Amino acid sequence: MKHVVHPQTFAGLGYEQRQEIVMINTYEKGELSCILDVVLQYTQVTEEEFSSKHKSNDIVTARIIFSSVSRELLWHRLKMIGKVMNRHHSTVIHHVKTTQDLLKVDKSFYQIYHKCLEEAESKLTKHGFEHKGLPPSLRSQVRTTRGSDSNITQRLVFTQTTSR
């Protein structure tokens, strides 16, 4: 249910109340639920497991992917992403940082993450949701380089972005 408040009443509310209304209305648009559906489909985790307190490897992987994909495509507030997972915003920060490390070393995580990212982006577009996303030049990429001994090596390159 959307919280419809007269603009003058909304302006008179405290900061926390205004933010709560904005977060509820944002989630009810369905943007985050589209991403959540994609992540749950690829990781084969149920929604109950996802929002539970369990910390098994597959559940945590689903949460990490959801946090990072949501942040990369939608740039929602960390508090809103955390609320979907029944977690604190600092958990989302940790997940985004962990994603960067896992993409460097874990091939299966890399494949699942990019499949979820592409599928979520296409699903958001299909349902008509606006998603900012990062331009391809700023996304995490794997670049192929040649070493001095003519061996081809792959190197994961990240570009630092700000949230402001």
Image (cartoon, rainbow, N blue to C red):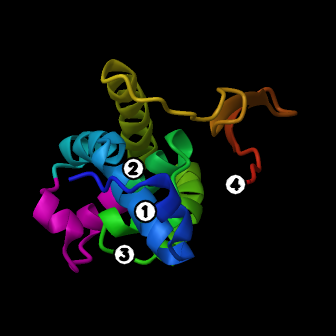
Q: Determine the residue positioned at 54% across, 54% down.
A: 105
Find the distance from the CA under tag 3 to the CA under tag 2.
17 Å
Task: For the residues labelled 1 and 4, say whether their Cβ atoms are less than 8 Å apart.
Answer: no
Label 4: which residue? 163
In contact (CB < 8 Å): disc 1 and disc 2? yes
Which x, y percent locates residue 29?
Answer: 32, 42
Of labels 3 and 2, earlier in sequence is 2
Query: Magenta residues, as a range?
Result: 45-63
Earlier in the chain: of badge 1 and badge 2, it is 2
Q: Quadrant of the C terminus?
A: bottom right
Residue 94: % across, % down = 53, 71
Dot 3 or dot 4, earlier in sequence: 3
Q: Is residue 63 left or right of residue 80?
A: left
What label sits on residue 87 in the rendered view?
Answer: 3
First of labels 4, 2 by sequence position: 2
| N-term-proximal mark, 3 vs 1 | 1
Q: Earlier in the sequence, mark 1 or mark 4?
A: 1
The picture quadrant where one finds residue 59 is bottom left
- Displayed quadrant of residue 147: top right
Q: Residue at x 50, y 76 (%)?
A: 16
Q: Are marks 3 and 1 in contact (CB under 8 Å)?
A: no
Q: Are marks 4 and 2 in contact (CB under 8 Å)?
A: no
**Classed neighbour count for the residue bearing mark 4: other residues with Cα under 10 Å, few (<14), some (14–19), many (≥20):** few
Task: Determine if the magenta segment contains residue 89.
Answer: no
In x, y percent, where is residue 8?
Answer: 52, 59
Amino acid bearing label 4: Ser
Residue bearing mark 1: 80
